[in-house]
Image (cartoon, helix red, strand yellow):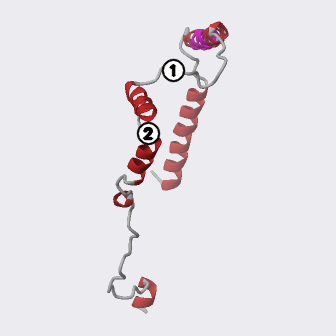
Amino acid sequence: MEPEDRKRMVDGWLDASLKQYGEAEPRPGLEGRVWANVRAERRRRLERGRRSTAAAADEPKLEQFPSPRPLSTQERLLLLYLRETPQQEVLSAASSAESLDDLQIKDLTVAPTDAPTAVPKSSAQN
């Protein structure tokens, strides 16, 4: 068989296959199932939105934000200490507190390397 005849034969098979593929009908019920899922998802989203809106409307409005909360044990102890300790002693304790220097990060210095100068490949080949 000649190459030209072979090409025409392959083109004919390809055209026939594409025509058959384009004429294929969807499986029965598939479209209905897809649309049912789309409608169900819309209903779920609407219901979720209604529930969240209703829940937000039912919550009481606070007079102050953030709302006050009871003091923790540590906060109560600190207030007790500040009330019962003379002011001069509190100031003295605060000024003699440890320095925060150990929490500081020193400046980072990076020494240059002794790497050879890079030469682009195109220049090295010429």
Residue identified by numbered label 2: 86
Residue 97 in percent (x, y) is at 37, 52
Relative to 81, does residue 50 appear above or below in the rendering? above
Residue 5 in percent (x, y) is at 52, 49
Query: How many C-alpha atoms fall within 10 Å of the one at disc 2: few (<14), some, or many (≥20)?
Result: few
* Mark earlier in primary sequence (2, 1): 1
Is 43 in front, or is 97? 97
Q: Quadrant of residue 21?
A: top right
The residue sitting at the bottom extreme is 126
- Mark 1: which amino acid? Arg
Query: How many C-alpha atoms fall within 10 Å of the one at disc 1: few (<14), some, or many (≥20)?
Result: few
Relative to 34, does residue 117 appear above or below in the rendering? below
Q: Which mark's residue is nearer the viewer, 2 or 1?
A: 2
Is 57 in front, or is 30? 57
What whole-number distance in Å separates the C-alpha atoms at marks 2 and 1? 28 Å
Which residue does the image show at 38% across and 75% down from the upper left? 109
Q: Which secondary structure class fits the magenta region best?
A: helix
- Mark 2: which amino acid? Pro
Is 49 in front, or is 105? 105
Give the magenta-colored segment's residue range: 34-48
Taking the magenta stretch, the answer to whether it contains residue 45 is yes
Relative to 93, does residue 72 appear above or below in the rendering? above
Residue 107 in percent (x, y) is at 41, 70
Taking the magenta stretch, the answer to whether it contains residue 89 is no
Q: Quadrant of residue 102?
A: bottom left
Relative to 81, does residue 9 appear above or below in the rendering? below
**Secondary structure type for disc 2:** loop
Please give the label number shown on residue 55: none
Determine whether, in the image, residue 76 is placed left or right of residue 10: left
**Secondary structure type for disc 1:** loop
Which residue does the image show at 45% across and 31% down from the upper left? 83
Please give the label number shown on residue 69: 1
